Amino acid sequence: MKFALIGCAGYIAPKHLQAIKEVGGELIAALDPHDSVGILDSYFPNCRFFTEFERFDRHLDKLRRVGEGVDFVSICSPNYLHDAHCRFALRLGADAICEKPLVVNTRNLDGLIELEQETNRVIYPISQLRLNDDILTLKNEIKSISSPKGYLYNVKIEYSTYRGYWYDYSWKANEEKSGGLIFNIGVHLIDLLIYLFGENVQVDKVFGDNKTHLSGNLSFPDAKARFYLSIKTHETSRKLIIDGREIDLSNKFRDLHVQSYENICHGTGLRIKDVRRSIELCNEIRNKLKGK
């Protein structure tokens, strides 16, 4: 299997490089406007590297025309570019593997689905937290346990860490490009809650600025959930608590991108429909903060 990678100088790219390597893939070409990408040597030293999209596009198109095109384009670019880069992959004749969030505006999802149908290619979103053993066990327990009528799980999910001054000058701090904190970090947690308790959810209350901190209350048919996000605290905490039972979201997540890629290569990866509700809910939270 042949891969191309968009965005190889960022934090998340090494997880994709490892996953491509682990599934026996070959990285043919990589693109990033920043050229500090020596990490490629540790995984694919013969990978062609480009800092300009136009040359990257030309190279991959030439390979496609001689029957040597890539099978997948892995997308680790800034959030606001995910939609465009997924479109690029499908028009290139490849499937797309896209980091969260797939898009930051719900309205873009239907266009991507239409393009999947037109090109007969597939977009695979990454939601690796769903594959954690503790989360899978918990989901099975929630399904199997017969709770008393009207019983509501008491849920708290928290992600607090510190991001330095660089964050304020990056695209992540620009809400138009990132979607704000709810999409930079919150989408991971929102997706997890929807995976556990279903898509029937409403936003009760939200607080914060969507830049450095954010919290709120959500209502599911079987659960009341509180979420808390912060990037300006020196106390790191990543945890899910359900009825007093705590799951540490910092541990045992190292190889989940590899598992995601294995599922994708076997045709069982997540699809757009699987992450639609989490993107919708993040937008609802974002709009509620703005008073819309």
Image (cartoon, rainbow, N blue to C red):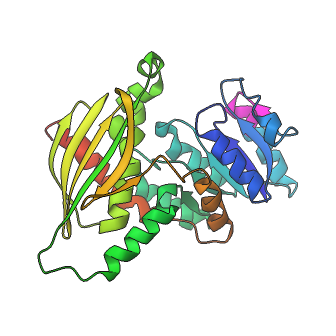
Quick check: 143 left or right of 266?
left
Q: Answer whether residue 68 is magenta in the image.
A: no
Taking 170 as reference, is 270 above or below it? Answer: below
The x and y percentages for residue 105 are 36, 46
Based on the displayed image, in which of its 4 quarters is residue 174 positioned?
A: top left
- For the point 42% across and 32% down, the residue is 177
The x and y percentages for residue 128 are 52, 56
Can residue 51 be seen here? The reply is yes
Label total for image: 0
The x and y percentages for residue 163 are 43, 25
- For the point 80% across and 38% down, the residue is 42
Taking 43 as reference, is 21 above or below it? Answer: below
**Is the C terminus in the top left, top right, bottom left or bottom right quadrant?**
top left
Taking 77 as reference, is 61 above or below it? Answer: below
Can residue 210 be seen here? The reply is no
Quick check: 184 left or right of 82?
left
Quick check: 258 left or right of 117?
right
**Is the N terminus in the top left, top right, bottom left or bottom right quadrant?**
bottom right
Based on the displayed image, in which of its 4 quarters is residue 123 positioned?
A: bottom right
- For the point 63% across and 65% down, the residue is 264
Taking 149 as reference, is 283 above or below it? Answer: above
- For the point 13% across and 38% down, the residue is 291
The magenta stretch is 49-56
The x and y percentages for residue 10 are 60, 32
Quick check: 209 left or right of 257?
left
